């Protein structure tokens, strides 16, 4: 009888202290040993990783599929298949659904639905709902990885999707921070000022709705930076484990710098803000609309500098698929177009391209899209590391290969609205994804099955 289920041999392996040439021994879905090349015990299966770089599977802490609502936009099966193709082995699903995931009953329904259909591992955010201790405590008992709120009102006609999630009133924002402080769970905030959004939307009403610049002018950077500054002031007293979602602007970077050390807060940005500008949105129209908007080159430059300085330490996809019919129905109408783009298959290749261009080290790129998130949310080293005892979630990448983004090869259901990605050529590609020691993606084909992914809980705090 073989001592191991699987050995991965011959690859360059990213360990916490950098790249090493070691063989990885796997049994029972976990890493049980790191061995000098050729010295691993016998295994039932050996995968030759020669010429490949082996990374811990990516942990995407900001993802939307909205299931079981809106299957026309994508399903748990379709979007977790896409995640596997993008080297993502664990995703954190946001609470926007229909109805909102703001009650224990809805949380349970979504958890069970994902368990039946997910190809990769998943965790679920909860909305804090009625802001009571009873709801908070039950969500934690059910396994919520974190909580999410918006500082904006619910979009028109979507009240049930945002009930218990949208808190435009600052008093409620402070109540939420205080309620969730001390739970050990991060509080993630989509931060834009409700009053400033209303003000600038009114000013932009006379502008051409077909212009990408109109969207940017209706939600300028000051809406984000003011909301973030107010949250950080509130958190000086609340002392929640605060995380600012999808930072887009140089203004907000300056705010984050100014408040450094005042409370336990972190911030993320997304590939669409790091690799694209409003000019790209103008080229593709409403297919490039996201909230907050993709901004200007100066903002992109500031985000990269914030990453270099350690002001921003997380990069997430904010994957948010919509149907082709929904985007087409809004062509030429930025104010009313649905906001969101698919990005789960873009993030890792884009970061590998940044590594190839010398903007990041491989270790830093991986921290941004994986291990930092695993640590912040209480999953490390179960996730985010290649160490004995870690789950055998791995991704093979060819640093010398190339990824060409094209609708014909994307796995997301939203491939037909991935206009921002179409035709992009990126240095580096994903060749294999392994979940719990089993291959779920290899050379263009998703081999994982629905129900293979597990519901992920944060590790007990010490």
Image: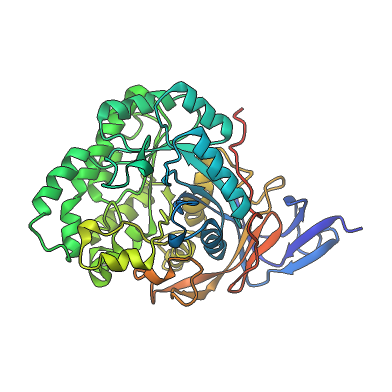
Classify residue 330 as left or right of residue 411.
Answer: left
The answer to whether any part of residue 65 appears in the image is yes
108 or 396, which lies in front? 108
Q: Position of residue 161 (x, y in %)?
A: 38, 44
Who's the residue at 80% across and 65% down the image? 45
The image quadrant where one finds the N terminus is: bottom right
Please, is residue 57 above or below residue 94 in the view?
Answer: below
Identify the colour scheme used: rainbow
The answer to whether any part of residue 377 appears in the image is no
Q: Quadrant of residue 143?
A: top right
The image quadrant where one finds the C terminus is: top right
326 or 213, which lies in front? 326
Q: Position of residue 162 (x, y in %)?
A: 36, 41
Who's the residue at 31% across and 53% down the image? 303
* Residue closest to the far right: 1
Please, is residue 422 above or below residue 201 in the view?
Answer: below
295 or 128, which lies in front? 128
Who's the residue at 27% across and 40% down the image? 152
Q: Position of residue 21 (x, y in %)?
A: 68, 62
Q: Position of residue 48 (x, y in %)?
A: 72, 70
Please, is residue 179 above or below residue 209 in the view?
Answer: above
Q: Quadrant of residue 54?
A: bottom right
Classify residue 443 as left or right of residue 91.
Answer: right
């Amino acid at each position: 009888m073989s001592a191991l289920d699987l050995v991965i041999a011959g690859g360059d392996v990213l360990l916490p202290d950098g790249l090493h040439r070691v063989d990885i021994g796997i049994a029972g879905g976990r890493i049980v040993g790191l061995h000098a090349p050729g010295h691993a015990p016998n295994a039932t299966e050996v995968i030759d990783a020669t010429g490949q770089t082996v990374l811990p599977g990516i942990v995407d802490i900001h993802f939307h599929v909205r299931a079981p609502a809106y299957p026309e936009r994508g399903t748990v099966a379709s979007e977790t298949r896409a995640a596997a193709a993008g080297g993502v082995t664990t995703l954190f699903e946001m609470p926007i659904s229909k109805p909102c995931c703001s009650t224990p009953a809805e949380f349970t329904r979504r958890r069970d639905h994902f368990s039946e259909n997910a190809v990769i591992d998943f965790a679920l955010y909860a909305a804090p709902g009625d802001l009571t201790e009873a709801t908070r405590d039950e969500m934690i008992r059910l396994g919520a990885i974190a909580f999410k709120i918006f500082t904006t009102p619910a979009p028109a006609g979507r009240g049930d999707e945002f009930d218990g999630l949208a808190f435009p009133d600052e008093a409620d924002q402070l109540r939420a921070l205080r309620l969730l402080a001390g739970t050990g769970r991060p509080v993630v905030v989509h931060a834009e000022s409700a009053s400033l959004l209303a003000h600038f939307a009114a000013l932009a009403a006379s502008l051409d709705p077909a212009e990408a610049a109109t969207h940017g002018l209706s939600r300028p950077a000051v809406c984000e930076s003011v909301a973030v500054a107010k949250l950080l002031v509130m958190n000086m007293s609340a002392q929640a484990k605060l995380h600012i979602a999808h930072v887009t602007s140089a203004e907000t970077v300056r705010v984050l710098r100014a408040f450094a050390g005042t409370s336990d807060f972190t911030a993320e940005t997304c590939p669409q803000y790091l690799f694209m500008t409003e000019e790209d949105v103008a080229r593709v129209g409403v297919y490039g609309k996201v909230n907050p908007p993709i901004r200007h080159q100066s903002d992109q430059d500031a985000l990269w500098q914030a990453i270099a300085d350690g002001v921003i330490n997380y990069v997430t996809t904010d994957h948010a698929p919509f149907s082709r019919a929904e985007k087409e129905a809004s062509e030429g109408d930025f104010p009313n177009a649905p906001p969101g783009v698919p990005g789960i298959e873009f993030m890792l290749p884009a970061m590998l391209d940044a590594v190839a261009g010398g903007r990041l080290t491989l270790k830093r790129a991986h921290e941004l899209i994986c291990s930092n998130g695993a640590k912040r949310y209480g999953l490390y080293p179960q996730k985010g590391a290649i160490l004995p005892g870690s789950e055998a979630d791995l991704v093979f990448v060819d640093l010398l290969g190339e990824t060409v983004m094209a609708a014909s090869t994307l796995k997301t259901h939203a491939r037909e609205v991935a206009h921002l990605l179409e035709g992009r050529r990126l240095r580096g590609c994903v060749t294999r994804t392994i979940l719990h020691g089993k291959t779920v993606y290899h050379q263009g084909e998703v081999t994982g099955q629905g129900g293979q992914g597990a519901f992920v809980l944060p590790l007990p705090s010490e």
